[in-house]
Image (tube, rainbow, N blue to C red):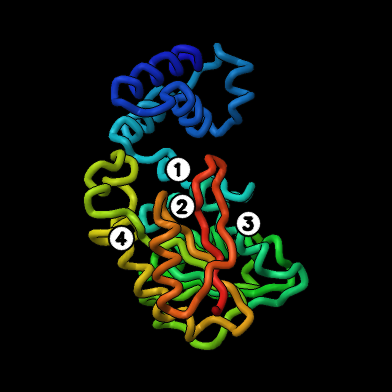
Amino acid sequence: MTAREALRHGGAQLAAAGVDNPRLDARLLLAYGEDISQAALLADPGRPVNAARYDALLARRAAREPLAYIVGSQEFWSLPFQVSPATLIPRADSEAVVEAALTALAPDSPGPILDLGTGTGCLLLAVLHERRRAWGVGVDLAPDAAQLAARNARALGLADRVAFLAGDWDSAVAGRFAVILSNPPYVTLDELAGLQPEVGVWEPRRALDGGADGLAAYRRILARIPLLLAPSGSAVLEVGAGQADPVAALAAQAGLRLAGRQADLSGTIRALRLNFA
C-alpha cells in the first residue's frame, strides 16, 4: 500500500466512524505510524507504508479513542506534553488560565504556585516556563497523573522547580501560595451524557464530573483557597461556558473578589482571577 492509497483508505474509514476531520486524522496517524513528518509524507505519496500498523492505528481512532492518547502527546502553550488516559487532554481553551496567571505573577516573582487537579501539569508547567524564577507544586488525586506530570516536567527541563503529589485537592499541601491554579471538573450530569465519545467514553470521568450543577468542585476548592492563598496572591480558576457569574458568586461567599476575567480564543470567558476582598 502506498501513502496515497493509505490516506484515501484511512480518511474513508474514519469518516464512516463519525470522526471529525477524518482526512487530517488519517494523515496524522499515518505520519505517526511511519515515524516521519506530515511534510515528508505528502512529499512522497508513492512511498510504501506499513499497512498492518496503520490499520491498527485506524481501528483505535475509529473506536473514537482520542488522537492524543494514540500518539501519546498533545501540544499546549507551544510546548509538548505527554498524555495518558489518567489525565484530561490539554486544550487550547485552558491557555486562558495561563494568560490570567501570568497577569497575576510578576516576571521576577519566585511564586510559589499551587496547581490543584494538575493532570498533565500543563497549566503549572506553562506558567513556570514563562516565569523562570518561580517554583510550584501540583496535586492530583490520581497517582498516575502526578507521575505523568513529573515526567513532563523532566522533559521540559523544569523538574528542579516543581514537585507533583498525589492527594485529594489540597490535602497534601500546606502553606501560602502567590498563585493558585485549578481546572476543576465542571461538566454537569446532564451534559455528561451528551459528550462526544472521545471525551465521555475515553477521558477520566473524575476530571469531568462537576455534579448536578457543575459547581461541586468549585464549592470544595473555594472553601479552602482562603487558607492557602498569600494575602496579596491570586487564584485563577478555569470555568465552563456560562459559569463565570455563578463561580464568582461562590468566590464572594468565600471572601474573594473577582479581579479579572480571561476569554479563550472563541471569546468565551474561560478563566477567573480572584483576590482577597
Taking the spot 57% from the left edge, 54% from the top edge, the residue there is 262
Check disc 2 and give the amino acid type. Val
Which mark is first along the chain, 1 or 2?
1
Check disc 1 and give the amino acid type. Ala
Taking the spot 45% from the left edge, 68% from the top edge, the residue there is 146
Which mark is first along the chain, 3 or 1?
1
Closest to the camera, between mark 1 and mark 4, is 4
Check disc 4 and give the amino acid type. Gly
Q: Label 2: which residue?
A: 83
**Counting other residues with Cα less than 10 Å from the Cα at mark 4, is it few (<14), some (14-19), or many (20 or more)?**
many
115 to 51, vertically: above or below: below
Q: Label 4: which residue?
A: 210
**Counting other residues with Cα less than 10 Å from the Cα at mark 2, is it few (<14), some (14-19), or many (20 or more)?**
many
Give the SS element for disc 2: loop
Camera-side residue: 11 or 270? 270
Alpha carbon of mark 4 to alpha carbon of mark 3: how far?
24 Å
Q: Label 3: which residue?
A: 99
Alpha carbon of mark 1 to alpha carbon of mark 4: how far?
23 Å
Which mark is first along the chain, 3 or 4?
3
Which mark is first along the chain, 2 or 3?
2
